[in-house]
Amino acid sequence: MVSGLACLDLLLGRDASVQKWKKIFLAIFQGKLDEGQIKRLLLLLAKRGEGASEIMGCLEAVRRLEPPRRVAVPFLVDVCGTGGDGRHTFNISTVSSFVIAGAGGSVAKHGNRAVSSRAGSSDLMEALGVRLDVPFPRMRRALEECRLGYFHAPIYHPTFSRVQAVRRKLGIRTLFNLMGPLVNPLELDYQIMGVARREWLEPLANVMRSLGRRKAAVFRSEDGLDELSTRAPSDILYLEGPRLRRMRLDPSRLGFSKAKEADYAGGDIRANREIAVGILQGRLKGPRLEIVLLNSGFVLWLVGIASNLEEGVERSGWVIRSGRAMQVLEALRRITNARVGT
């Protein structure tokens, strides 16, 4: 009945309240709605466009069922885009995570396998030799020792298993692309989030404000990427405590050469693994390296490791050249693959 009321509200163009959406998503996660009802709801939302009420309602439902945990590490941040931009780039934010950790940030990377792309962050991590199925204390150890923990969504959010089959069958971006970055299993201090649509900037920035992030940024590049792009300027909503302000980042002012869209292209998981390792080892140059430097540098500035964006980009390059980014990967592999008791 709750699902029927929600669909009626959508068809009539009305916004349901946050509390109504919370009830709807609790019903979904608790298995009270069938696959057909969930599919219709997601399609209606995608067609109309998701707003703050349904995003917040879904978020409150998840946090009620799976409260986030607190880990005492400095500069705790997640770096994640919504996906759904249709560009099939390589795993930019995942590769950036190793660079940020190598520079002194603490990255609680939250991700999943591919739904609407060919290689999700979990697919890449697994291909890089990182075990996804280790218990939380082991991944917390990784976060404390090498400053990067990877939190595979199905392990930490079993509630989403109710919708994973529907998402795969639909094969399109849905509201749950927006939820992935917001439901990190840890309480974050900082967060950046790239979005595929401009209209999501303000609702998602306000959601992050309600979550109490110390600093956060939501952005979209003019070329349509849910990453900071070196091809085009990006519009950014920057949150510092309760204050929200607009920024515009022009990559040409940082000396980046204008790339082509094909320069960011990924492929299957084998191709994306080769790109990731090539960047982390310092062998791969050019636009793919530059977009990682830009996104990593922005995070280092956001969390306060770098005093400005230029310094953040420069430090990111040094982290790769010095081998520290690759050392983070090697440590994460070692910790997640160690035998119990070691």
Image (cartoon, rainbow, N blue to C red):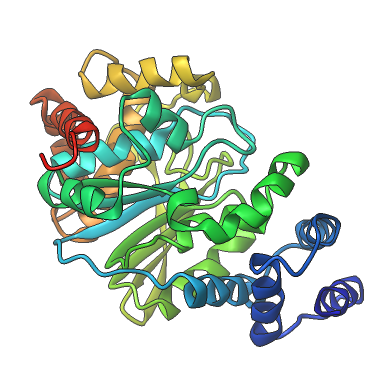
- Depth order, front residue of 290/327: 327
Q: 227 and 277: which one is in front? A: 277
- Residue 302 in the image: state x and y as whole percent: 25, 58
User: In the image, residue 208 lies at what x, y percent?
Assistant: 43, 71
Which corner quadrant of the image does residue 203 belong to? bottom right
Residue occupying the point 28% across, 32% down = 255
Residue 240 visible in the picture? yes
Residue drawn at point x = 60 percent, y = 53 percent? 161
Q: Is residue 155 left or right of residue 34?
A: left
Total count of labels: 0
In the image, residue 43 above or below residue 311 = below
x and y, in percent, of residue 42 in the image:
76, 58
Q: In the image, residue 94 lies at what x, y percent?
A: 36, 38
Q: Residue furthest front?
A: 341
The answer, for residue 235, to whether it is visible in the render is: no
Q: Quadrant of residue 185?
A: bottom left
**Left or right, residue 232 beside residue 290:** right
Quarter of the rendering occupied by the C terminus = top left
The one nearer the camera, 194 or 113, is 113
Q: Vertically, is 133 above or below 321?
A: below
Residue at 51 percent of width and 55 percent of height? 180
